[in-house]
Image (spheres, rainbow, N blue to C red):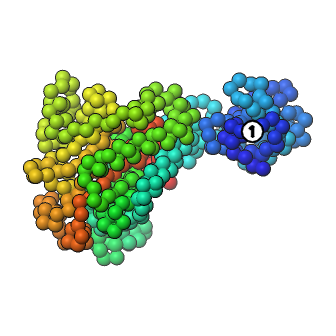
Amino acid sequence: MVKRIVDILRNGQPEESVTVQGWVRTKRESKEFAFLEVNDGSSMANLQIVLNQDLPNYAEVIKQLNTGASVEIAGVLVPSLGKGQRIELKAQTVKVYGEADPESYPLQKKRHSFEFLRTIGHLRSRTNSFGAVFRIRNACSYAIHQFFQERGFLWIHTPIISASDCEGAGEMFTVTSLNLRNVPRTEAQEVDYSQDFFGRPAYLTVSGQLEAEVMAMAFSNVYTFGPTFRAENSNTSRHLAEFWMVEPEMAFCDLEGDMDLAEAFLKHIFKYVMETCHEDMEFFNQRIDNSVLATAENIINNQFERLTYTDAIALLEKTDQTFEYPVKWGLDLQSEHERYLAEEVFKKPVILTDYPTEIKAFYMRLNDDEKTVRAMDILAPKIGEIIGGSQREERLEVLQRRIEAQGLNPADYWWYLDLRRYGTVPHAGFGLGFERLVQFMTGMGNIRDVIPFPRAPLTVDF
Ligand code: 4AD
Ligand code: MG
């Protein structure tokens, strides 16, 4: 029976017959034996395989078994004499599926830089670092669904092609139904892209929030988890043009309830990952960032700090710290300010609330002072903003006024306004940048290294 290597290493017993399939990581030859390390992606650990010269096709397979080759090996488990492993596999039959020419296979047994690995995106998942990243990414996804499903939230699927600019920031990619493949570039530039989706404008969604609000007005508690797109040409280690977002939306909920949910949510994900992926987390702690485990414990065990934007500005104005960008009430915080608050001042995640109306989206609920809105951002050490959320404006007149004030056309939002005309309720939600979460959890420095196929300026190879 074919077994996953992780199961063999945990539960395999001497004298048990097993078959494994995977890729060769290394080969060592001595006079009478050869040792292989084989990995199948089920965990960081490799299974050691002992090949004996009495294997029928020994001479032939030993030549084929280079780093990267794919194999199926059947044999018997035996106690291992080597250090660091309990058990190893004594091979009885070896089948080589595909060789990997050592002259040209780019992944050799040495440490490759992440920059180099980004140029071979189709192979990098076979390394220890990316194996660990994508297993953690998977565990986070599972924990997210578990968290919401256990609380009765409905997972809803919001559209990727959308007509509305949720954030009102004009960062939308245009979608066209025209086939421009054979149109010369100069002519293509004259096409009126604003009418392009079968005669109407359409874009790639920047957020599923507005549609999530529609569904929350029927199901009370819902969440989205899917890809979103931003046409911002930012070449930073925190921005992607295509990223995944998790967006819960709750009817009959205010900003306090929203913050409580967001905090419980992050704690749940960290707890789940620490329980189920400890080996991978240890790896990050040793090899990538030696504060990863302490950070996870900190998230799980400590309450997040909560303060208003206004108090945060006062605090930043008072410090001796010098910043590249100015700090002034009314200006948006830059990631250096966000990180300073989370890393230096509070040393844990910080939830900032009640941002200036001018710098936030039209749908956020206006406070009585009219100068601020019921927004909240969660700022994480090393990352900055990881979650952005708010209580939504549920009053029809105020919302109409806010749409106009931001230079948007209320006619475009007729259905969204209908939600306030018919059975409106206080409601709130937030968006978690999924890749920023994975970065935060693993300590990986560049957001392009926590998504299998990053989409950012100059990265689209395939
Ligand atoms: O703060 P944002 O723009 O909020 C929204 O989109 C709301 N509609 C969410 C809601 O209330 N339902 O984005 C939410 C999060 C940010 O906090 C950040 O973590 C992430 O999405 N994010 C990005 N991640 C990677 N690359 C980008 N270009 C990102 N832009 C935002
Ligand atoms: Mg934001």
Query: Image quadrant of residue 26?
Result: top right
Residue 321: x percent and y percent?
Answer: 21, 25
Res. 30 visible in picture: yes
Is the residue indicated by label 1 positioned so its CB lies within 8 Å of ligand 1?
A: no
Q: Which residue is mark 1?
A: 12
* Figure check: 309 above or below 247: above
Closest to the observer, 462 or 430: 430
Residue 450: x percent and y percent?
Answer: 46, 43
From the viewer's perspective, tell me whether residue 145 is left or right of residue 81: left
Residue 107: x percent and y percent?
Answer: 61, 37
* Figure check: 87 above or below 429: above
Residue that appears at 15% across and 54% down: 366
Closest to the observer, 68 or 345: 345
Furthest-left residue in this view = 369
Residue that appears at 53% across and 38% down: 275
Furthest-bottom residue in this view = 199
Residue 167: x percent and y percent?
Answer: 25, 56
Assign a secondary structure to mark 1: loop
From the viewer's perspective, tell me whether residue 367 is left or right of residue 122: left
Which residue type carries mark 1? Answer: Gly
* Figure check: 362 above or below 273: below
Residue that appears at 41% across and 41% down: 267
Closest to the observer, 182 or 22: 22
